[in-house]
Amino acid sequence: MKSIYCSILLALFCSLLLSCSDIKKDSKGREDFSIFINKFYSDIDFQLTRIEFPVPGSKLENGKVELLEKEDWIILKPIDQKNPDFDVRNVEITDELIEQRIVVKKSFIIKLQFSLNPVTKLWYLSSYPGVTGARANTNSETEEKTINPVTVTPDSTYE
């Protein structure tokens, strides 16, 4: 009986190792952000596993930060890559933090922040500061490094 449990545990461990090895890494040993972000927007189940709930959201009128729970989350969906109304920039703030800035019709910006788990080297949505408005400028001098732009949009709530 003990050998059956050991065999089952060994099989589970091996399958876990094999599934982890499918993750493409960048030159810094991190999960490749471009592959991650495309899967994040195209696979709902994957998206939900890669969000650190509760997610800090936008600031409320009282100055506190809204915390978004899993049950309140609106799934983020991809849009047509050729849509000229959207401009997406993935800005590497540090080696462990990438901010995605989605400019909609050059009028407002939706921001999402993705943090790198220091142990697994996988990306997770860690903050959703929300929408900032009025004539967004994507050519900001404060941008440090833009990583492979991806065109995405949140659910129709923002349209």
Image: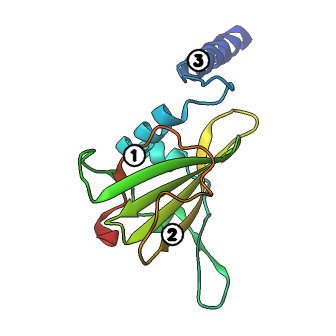
Rendered-image quadrant of the N terminus: top right
Residue drawn at 67 percent across, 86 percent down? 63
Residue at the extreme bottom of the image, as rendered: 62
Q: CA distance from mark 1 to mark 2?
A: 17 Å
- Amino acid type, label 2: Gly
In the image, 126: left or right of 86? right
Q: On residue 94, which mark appears?
A: none
Q: Which residue is mark 3?
A: 21
Q: Which residue is mark 2?
A: 130
Residue 145: quadrant of the picture: top right
Of helix, strand and loop, which one carries label 1? helix
Q: Nearer the viewer, residue 129 or 148?
A: 148
Q: Is residue 129 above or below residue 31?
A: below
Could you tell me which quadrant the C terminus lies in? bottom left
Q: Residue at horizontal 32%, vertical 57%?
A: 86
Using residue 14 as the reference point, say whether residue 100 is left or right of it.
left
